[in-house]
Each structure stands twice: as C-alpha cells, then as structure tokens.
Amino acid sequence: IAKRGANTWQIIYSVVSIAGFVILVYGYGLARENAEQLYLPISGARGVALIVMPIALILLISSPGPVGHIKKTIRHPMLWAIILWASLHLANNGDTASVVMFGALLVWAIFDLVSCYRRGGTPPAASVAADIIAIIVGLIVTYVFVSFLHQFLFGVGVV
C-alpha cells in the first residue's frame, strides 16, 4: 500500500476478489450438477428468504459507500449481509455443493466479524442520505434478482 497507494491496492484487491468469486460460483455450478442431497430445505425457509434477503442486500449496498446510520450502527454490514445470505441459502439448499459453499462462507464471515469487532474502532459521523441510497438501491437489486437475474445467473428461480 505504501509503495503503490491505497487506491491501487483497493483496485487490485477488488479485481482479485471478484475473480475469486466468479471462480467460486462457477465451481459451485459444476459441483451442483452431481451433488447429493444431505437434507431437505427447511419448511418455510423460502418465505423467510423473500423477507430477509432485501435486508441482506441493503446491508451489502451500505457497506462500500459513505457512512450512514446503518453502517455506523452495524459497523460491518457486508459481513452481516454474507451471514444472512449464506444462512438463508443453507436453509433452502441441502445438497453437498451448497453446504460446502454457503457453509464455508458463513463460517468465514462469522470469524471475520468476530475479528473485526475485537479490533474496535469508532465510525465517523453518519449521513441519512447514505442510508436512503442504500435502501433504494438494495430494493432495486432485490427486485431485479427476484424478477429474473437469479434465474438467469444460477438457473434457479426465486419465486
């Protein structure tokens, strides 16, 4: 970071993270084709997911932007978003590929969250505008995913 600057580091880190996520999703898709069913989806989990996933997406959207009250209060909204997302997907998918992928991401997010909270830190002043933007964008992303994007990307309809 000292050698190339914070912005360059963030760009490199983001590109590597996105590439890793794409590889993870691709591998999950391949593994899912022959995955054995370990357990049946939890009854009612789909309905819970329809209610909770918009919250997870709002948390995810609030993470990289300016500090709003959501980010200031929760401090690590992206990790909480991943915890909600992974938990809901585990409740709705009982095959081995899902258990491995969503379970690993859930465990990682929990350990990372504990580590982050131990480090402490005080968030700066919050902006209501940042919260409004996160909520609006999160709801739009939810609508797009529910309407067609989840089916298009992963071959599984939400509704």
Image (cartoon, grey):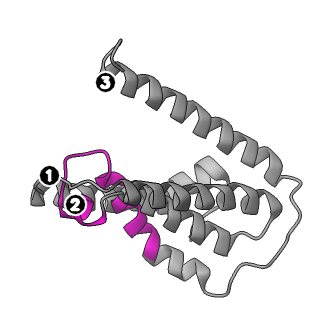
Residue beneath disc 1? 124
- Figure quadrant of residue 5: top left
- Figure quadrant of residue 98: bottom right
Residue 29 belongs to magenta span: no
Whether the residues at callouts 1 and 2 have beta carbons within 8 Å, the answer is yes
Under mark 2, the amino acid is Lys
Residue 35, x across and y down, in percent: 86, 58
| Earlier sequence position, callout 1 versus callout 3 | 3
- Which residue occupies the foreground of this view, 128 or 155? 128
Residue 147 shows in the view? no
- Figure quadrant of residue 133: bottom left
Residue 20, which numbered label? none
- Which residue occupies the foreground of this view, 76 or 19? 76
Majority secondary structure of the magenta segment? helix
Furthest residue in direction bottom, as rendered: 43
As helix, strand or loop, the secondary structure at mark 2 comes to helix
Measure how far apart labels 1 and 3 are at the Cα level. Answer: 19 Å
* Other-residue count near label 1 (Cα within 10 Å), few / some / many at <14 / 14–19 / ≥20: few
Q: Which residues are magenta?
A: 52-74
Under mark 1, the amino acid is Pro
Residue at (50% x, 54% y) in the render = 112
Under mark 3, the amino acid is Ala
Residue beneath disc 2? 72
Residue beneath disc 3? 6
